[in-house]
Amino acid sequence: MTPDAINLAIALWGAITGTIAITLSVIQYYVERPRLQLQWLRNFAIMALGSDGRMRGAGPTIARLVVTNVGRQNIRVIGAYGAKRETDGTVGLFMFSDGLLDASANRVLAPENPSTEFQINEGPHLDEIVFVAVNDGFGRSHVLWLVSWFQKLAVKRRFRQMKAKKAVKAA
């Protein structure tokens, strides 16, 4: 073998193994990165054991926002909020109250403890909810839209209009 052939073989071997290593690193990053999955569940009754040994509804029904980390790295959930359509056409934001009151309670989602939940009392006001979302420790918002794509576009347009009005008032 000539020295050029040996150099070519070594260069090809380095290019192949380098490409494989980079590909595996990218795949590992996408598999292990923290990813939040949101579920919006409604009409859950709080149950209690009655004196006759049967389970009975003991309080108001609740809606649950279940947040699950489907990645392998830890992530902290800071708080949860939602948006609803108001009667005058505006969009109002509201926060889930236990996001403010007990921020340290079980909100770091790890492979050992992958999910947490926020709860809110059921009522007719929940029928007008457009989306629910959570903020993570990196400052990102993870949104679960509850309306069709057409209504989603209308809500985004309304948010932009509201933001533009606030900017004009501030100037």
Image (cartoon, helix red, strand yellow):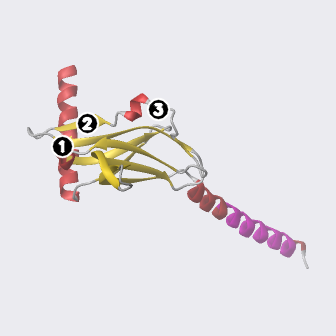
* In the image, residue 147 above or below residue 109: below
> What secondary structure is the magenta-colored segment mainly?
helix
Q: Which residue, given by chain and number where applicable, does mark 3 sit on?
A: 103
> Does residue 55 appear in this view?
yes
Q: Amino acid at mark 2?
A: Leu
Q: Secondary structure at mark 1?
A: helix
Q: Is residue 17 magenta?
A: yes
Q: Which residue, given by chain and number where applicable, does mark 2 sit on?
A: 93
Q: Is residue 71 magenta?
A: no
Q: Position of residue 11 (x, y in %)?
A: 78, 67
Q: Nearer the viewer, residue 123 or 95?
A: 123
What is the CA distance from the residue labelled 3 to the residue labelled 1?
25 Å
* Res 78 quadrant in image: top left
* In the image, residue 86 above or below residue 2: above
In the image, farthest residue toward the bottom: 1
* In the image, residue 62 above or below residue 3: above
Pair 2/1: label in front: 1
Q: Amino acid at mark 1?
A: His
Q: Amino acid at mark 3?
A: Ala
Q: Earlier in the sequence, mark 2 or mark 1?
A: 2
Residue pictured at 51% horizontal, 32% vertical: 104
Q: Which residue, given by chain and number where applicable, does mark 1 sit on?
A: 125
Q: Which mark is residue 97?
A: none
In the image, farthest residue toward the front: 52
Residue pictured at 35% horizontal, 43% vertical: 119
Q: Position of residue 4 (x, y in %)?
A: 85, 72
Q: Earlier in the sequence, mark 2 or mark 3?
A: 2
Residue pictured at 17% horizontal, 30% vertical: 165
The span picked out in magenta is 4-22
Q: Position of residue 112 (x, y in %)?
A: 61, 51
Answer left or right for 77 relative to 12: left
Q: Earlier in the sequence, mark 3 or mark 1?
A: 3
